[in-house]
Image (cartoon, helix red, strand yellow):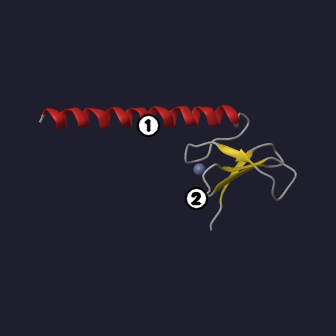
């Protein structure tokens, strides 16, 4: 029983640490891609070159599928890329 309780506490601590690491990673990405919009999934987007000379970004997760671009009004439009 004592052993069980100890390992349960440990896995709870590990989960907390993983959550903290995730938050730190998100913060780091937001800092690194400072001028990038935030994806609909909540993660950062990275700039890439495609279509036009304007600014465009895509989600850091390639499975996510969202891309964003700056239109002629300077607004950021999001598009979902189907694969
Ligand atoms: Zn995304």
* Total marks placed: 2
Question: Any atom of ligand 1 within 8 Å of the CB at mark 1?
Answer: no
Residue under label 1, please give it: 18
Which residue is painted at 62% across and 58% down in the image? 65
Q: Which mark is residue 51?
A: none
Q: Nearer the viewer, residue 25 or 56?
A: 25
Place of residue 63 in the rendered image (x, y in percent of width and height, measured from the top left): 58, 58
Above or below, comparing residue 14 to residue 50 in the picture: above
Q: Quadrant of the C terminus?
A: bottom right
Which badge, 2 or 1, is on the more N-terminal residue? 1
Picture quarter containing residue 10?
top left
Q: Nearer the viewer, mark 2 or mark 1?
A: 1
Residue 40 shown left or right of residue 78 in the figure: left
Task: Please tell me which residue lies in front, 40 or 45.
Answer: 45
Which residue is the extreme one toward the right? 53
In the rendered image, residue 1, in percent from the top left (x then y), is placed at: 11, 36
Q: Position of residue 11 (x, y in %)?
A: 31, 37
Q: At 64% from the left edge and 49% from the top edge, which residue is drawn? A: 60
49 or 77, which lies in front? Answer: 49
Around disc 2, counting alpha carbons within 10 Å, would you say few (fewer than 14), some (14 to 19), or many (20 or more)?
Answer: few
Callout 1: SS: helix
Residue pictured at 51% horizontal, 33% vertical: 23
Left or right of 30 in this view: 2: left
For mark 2, what is the residue? 63
Question: Residue 46's image quarter?
Answer: top right
Q: At numbered mark 2, what does the secondary structure look like: helix, strand or loop?
A: loop
Instruction: Residue 53 in the image: state x and y as whole percent.
Output: 88, 51
């Amino acid at each position: 029983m004592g052993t069980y309780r100890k390992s349960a506490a440990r896995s709870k601590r590990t989960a907390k640490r993983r959550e903290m690491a995730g938050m730190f990673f998100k913060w780091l990405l937001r800092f690194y891609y400072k001028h990038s919009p935030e994806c609909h999934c909540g993660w950062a987007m990275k700039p890439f070159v495609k279509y036009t000379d304007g600014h465009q970004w895509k989600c850091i997760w390639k499975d996510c599928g969202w891309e964003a671009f700056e239109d002629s009004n300077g607004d950021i439009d999001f598009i979902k890329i189907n694969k």
